Amino acid sequence: MANNNLMVGLEIGTSKICVVVGESRPDGTLKILGVGQAPSRGVRKGEIVDFETATKCLHEAVVDAEQKSDVMVKSVYVAVGGSHLQSFNNRGCVMLPEDRDEIDEQDVEDVKINAREVSIPAQNAFLHSVIQHYQVDGQQGVLNPVGMLGEKLEADFHIIHGVRTRIQNSIRCVKELPLDVEDVVFSGLASAQVVLTQHEKDLGALVVDMGGGTTDYVLYSEGAVRQSGCLAVGGDHITNDISMGLRIPMARAEKLKTEEGSCILGNSLPGEMILLKDDSGFAGKEVERETLNTIIHLRLREAFELLKRRLEEEPYLGYLGAGIFITGGCSLLNGIDHLAADIFEIPANLTHAQAAWGVTSAVENPQFSTAIGLVKFAQVMHTDRPSRGFRRIFRGLFSGKR
Amino acid sequence: MIQLNKNYSLPERLAEFIPIKIVSVGGAGLNALDRIVLDGLERADVVAINTDVHSLTSSVATRKVQLGRSVSRGLGAGGDPDVGYQAALESADEIREALTDSRVIFVCAGLGGGTGSGAAPYVAQAAREAGALVIAFVTLPFGFEGKRRNTQAREALARLNEFAHSVVCFENDRMGDLTPPKAGIHQAFAMVDMTISQSVRSIVNLIQRPGLIRIGFDDLLSALRIRNSRCLFAYGESDSDNRAHDALTHALKNPLMDRGRMLADATHVLVQVAGGPSMTLSEVEILMQELGRHVSEQTQILFGAVVDARLGDRLSVTIISSLSAEEEVLLQTPPAPSGASAVAPVRERYQAAAPEPHVQTEEPTVQVQHFEKTIPFEEPVAAETESVAMPISTEPPVIPARNGRPEPAITAPQQKPVPRKEEKAPAEKSATPAKQEVLQFEPVTRGRFEKSEPTIIEGEDLDVPTYLRKNIKVK
């Protein structure tokens, strides 16, 4: 890309593939130039199962994005998901050499490496090590230790890892096109970048990105990622349940879900029926509204309860000041926020990408949270990198003098 | 002072050979038997028993017994258990002779027809009198085959329950659970046979395979000892990376297990883990730990481990247990009192012929003696029949069963040989290639996610609709 400020986020989702082209403005804001998308085939539960078909769909989506934004896409940030992703918190620790007591960039790198020195399964690879807090000589809550004086630097990291080969599948698919992959980002983390403001992260918030095949979640507390993960249950499961429960085809079930579905029980009149029209407009089967809602309700309740049990393994769920933020395609389902609030006993909000502007129809659509989040993530990385480079040069000169 | 013999060597513990016989009775049983033989079975004799000569000749069994040469004259029993029973009586000596010298006898039969319902209980009785452990594998007819046929099947099952030590019962009506809706009918039928074949073979392997931690005949007995019990059986196999987990998951998917929930009530659970030389201790540990979650703390787990080079990279797990059928007594529908008139006399005749099943005075071997001591069976008096409950539940979730080939519902004996032959030869043998080895038990369909990796969290397959798993009825 000619313009250094252009960034592209690509999400290979279970129901759609979408490509978001964004521009980082000098004032630090993010403008969305165009969104390309294509229905996804060959993807199940957030992971590619049919490589060739997925590549074709991916190509369509990229072409669409290029047309709409008038930008040649060359390199992308790719979101990865799937149930194989796991996460944990770990603390790294480095002791400074005797003759030096100022913490420098290298120490911060070392402590990150140190924190990664934990055993993860042999076939897994690290995806992210997200810094939570530093501690210098036991002093808590240090945000940036570079330049501080101390003997011992500790750091808490949230580490996300997944099966290497399955992460590589997405990368390979993109490289087939051929496009360069700048980075891979856990899709839940990407969504959180745009859905939450810094203030909400500080207060404590849970982002639930419920997509077609998977539900990604990221929990922030005191400004740092505490828990994250991916549950391989999503909108597809609801559609599948409806299709099996009401004995209608998947496409019809999908339509019924988006047009009529709700996860609130007892809201319909007794015996209220929904008339299913077939493609030719003739009246077909009748379905009781309460039945439909029951199927949806049971599935979502189960998914949320499962999520709650997972999150309760650590104590942060009780300290969410900002509440729950639901995004992703499933958040369009009627009543999902009430159900989530009911189960978690925490206020729940429906949300979409906040920290961006441009193509408003895209920004306001929760289905694009992840892809827009990727662009935001890229923006953060871009603004981070040069400054880090500068600092390193500067530090080099400085230490050379000493 | 007693000294430990340090030279104690393993080879002493090689499995002693336990003579096993697999006996099929009737047309459906014969089909299952053929399947078992075609799937490859070592260390067991097979005996085919039928009234119908045509199906006997086309069977691959090594030993064949034709029933009722004068009663049915080489034709089938015509769906009449009375004829089946008479035929068995006529050939009683041949049956007895065929059943001698075995310590375990499997009786496979499809109940509801003439030979299966009439002769199978008699064969089971003869087997028991020969001093063997009798395990019956039976199928119940489809609901659409009519009330009379079902009544016949249930009567026969009650009789069979008296004589067999354990009865594994598959319901044909449940066959739909096993096969995809679009599968051809021959495939659906083949599935039953394969299920039975799988069950029989894994029990045979269990007994015969020499193991590191051996499961003995005595262990099998204690797992199946409960009187009037319903047998829980599961077998799973996997060669994936996470094979310990996958094999167990496969096993618990077996409808007979109801996803492992049935195990919670069992007092004894017999588990055998078999694998190639690459099987590791940690794999076994993982598997047993996972299984441990499905059983209660009081349950005695009889564990066996086997290293068998022939398994290669695969790891297989066999779970056998039995549940007392008591709780099901309440649920089961009493057989129609006035029932089919043709059935009633049969029962009387049974009683006349076999007044006391406890005819085990001459014990052939010491082994058998020991076995007889282990099981304090209280032999039911024949008159008790009326009160003996059949372990057939009418409640859907409890017996997730299976299929079996119903004997063709032909009433006129004269027509029998021709359709039989047709049904057997093309539909059966050619349609089911012998290469299928591992049965994937899929009790409930996963719809769109059929072919994707299952999402199993906290022991539940999340791809299966929630309302199905929670048994919540939606219209």
Image (spheres, rainbow, N blue to C red):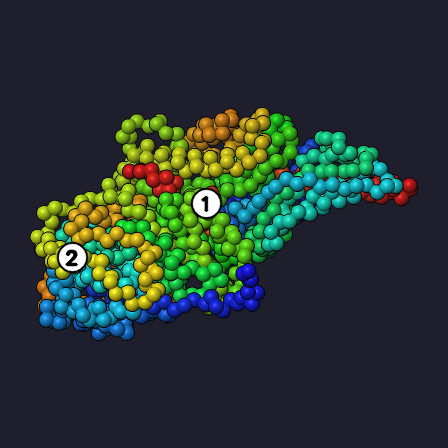
Q: Amino acid at mark 2?
A: Pro
The numbered mark 1 sits on a residue in which chain?
B
- In this rendering, is residue A298 above or below B170? above
Q: Which residue is mark 1?
A: B293
State the residue in front, B428 or A351.
Answer: B428
- In this rendering, is residue A307 above or below B12? above
Q: How dense is the environment of label 2, judged by Cα within 10 Å: few (below 14), some, or many (20 and up)?
A: some
Lower position in the chain sequence, tag 2 or tag 1: 1
Give the quadrant of the C terminus of chain B: top left
Question: In the rendering, at what x and y percent does residue B320 appear?
Answer: 37, 54
Question: In the rendering, at what x and y percent does residue A72 appear?
Answer: 61, 48
**Residue A267: mark:** none
Res A185 → quadrant: top right
Q: Which residue is mark 2?
A: B355
Task: Describe residue B6's horizontal placement relative to residue B439 as left or right.
Answer: right
Give the quadrant of the N terminus of chain B: bottom right
Q: Could you tell me which residue is drawn at 76 percent across and 38 percent down? A: A153
Q: Is residue A362 visible?
A: no
The numbered mark 2 sits on a residue in which chain?
B
Task: Describe residue A77's horizontal placement relative to residue A155 as left or right.
Answer: left
Q: Could you tell me which residue is drawn at 46 percent across and 47 percent down? A: B292
State the residue in front, B234 or A371.
Answer: B234
Q: Could you tell me which residue is drawn at 57 percent across and 39 percent down? A: A228
Q: How dense is the environment of label 1, judged by Cα within 10 Å: few (below 14), some, or many (20 and up)?
A: few
Q: Amino acid at mark 1?
A: Arg
User: Is disc 1 placed on a helix, strand or loop?
Assistant: loop
Question: In the rendering, at what x and y percent does residue B243 appear?
Answer: 49, 56
User: Is disc 2 placed on a helix, strand or loop?
Assistant: loop
